[in-house]
Image: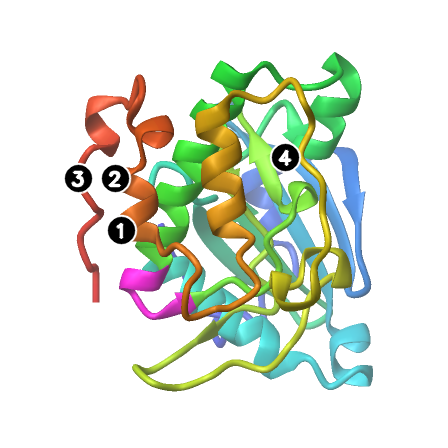
Amino acid sequence: MDSSIEQGGNCPNVFKQKYEPGDLIGCGGFGEVRTATDIQTRRKFAVKILIRERMERKKMEERVKREIEILRLLRHPHIIRLYEVIDTPKKIYLVMEYAELGDLTVYMEAIGKLQEEEARKIFQQIISGVEYCHENRVVHRDLKPENLLLDSERNVKIADFGVCNIISDGQFTTRCGCPDYFAPEDGIYTLPSHLSPEVKDLISRMLEKNPFERIEIPKIREHPWFQAHLPRYLTLPPPNTL
């Protein structure tokens, strides 16, 4: 179902021939995100619509191309899936998996604080998706609740790979993304008193200021809090798809 970003430039109506545009669900610097329904199958998707003029004005064509290439590479149950790219003279349509419940921020605002059991399930899925990215040398660089979507069964879908990059062993990445979610080298924090001792221990290890002493994903996987009620399909590290 995939099509190339370089193809289809002379077919401005291809998207409307295949999909019925729906509600606006998000806006960004280069365009917007809408729901869309496949005319034949009636399946619902989320479509990121990128305006070429805005991309060219901000010199972001290479960034968009990299995001598309990386999303095509990644196949994981907790990473948003790119199904199709439709390229037209004025717009690029990224037809993607639709996460009905929106992002994690909206969800938490609606229900209040997460219970620890549900927080564990979400955390397990995030770790699995991030680990899969790193196994494929992909760094997201903008992980935050707004970029963690939830489907109808409250399963995580890591989204928005707009500032992601591919990193080789020993290579460092530049600082980017939202300052509120930078690495904790300068961080000062307090832990809520209602948390269990096990999750407090894990959080403190993850927020260790010294990056050489900070817990890494293999050890996070072994932590008792992470292991509790771990679904069978998440018990093994994901394969490298490269």
Q: Is there a contact, CB below 8 Å, between mark 1 and mark 2?
A: yes
Q: Nearer the viewer, residue 24 or 126?
A: 126
State the SS at label 3. Answer: loop
State the SS at label 4. Answer: strand
Q: Which mark is residue 236?
A: 3
Residue under label 1, please give it.
218
Tell me the quarter of the picture where residue 73 sits: bottom left
Q: Quadrant of the C terminus?
A: bottom left
Magenta range:
134-138
Q: Residue at x 31, y 21 (%)?
A: 228
Q: Nearer the viewer, mark 4 or mark 1?
A: 1
Q: Is there a contact, CB below 8 Å, between mark 3 and mark 4?
A: no
* Residue 21 position within the rendered picture, expressed as x and y whole percent measured from the top left: 70, 36
- N-terminal-most mark, 4 or 1: 4
Q: Which mark is residue 36?
A: 4
Q: Mark 1: few, some, or many residues within 10 Å (few <14, many ≥20)?
A: few
Q: Mark 3: few, some, or many residues within 10 Å (few <14, many ≥20)?
A: few
Q: Nearer the viewer, mark 3 or mark 1?
A: 1
Disc 1/disc 2 C-alpha distance (Å): 7 Å
On the rendered structure, is 171 left or right of 89? left
Q: Amino acid at mark 1?
A: Pro
Residue 165 counted in the magenta span: no
Note whether 184 is above or below 95 in the view shown: below
- N-terminal-most mark, 3 or 1: 1
Count of numbered tags: 4
Disc 2/disc 4 C-alpha distance (Å): 41 Å
State the SS at label 2. Answer: helix
Q: Amino acid at mark 4?
A: Ala
Q: Is residue 167 visible?
A: yes
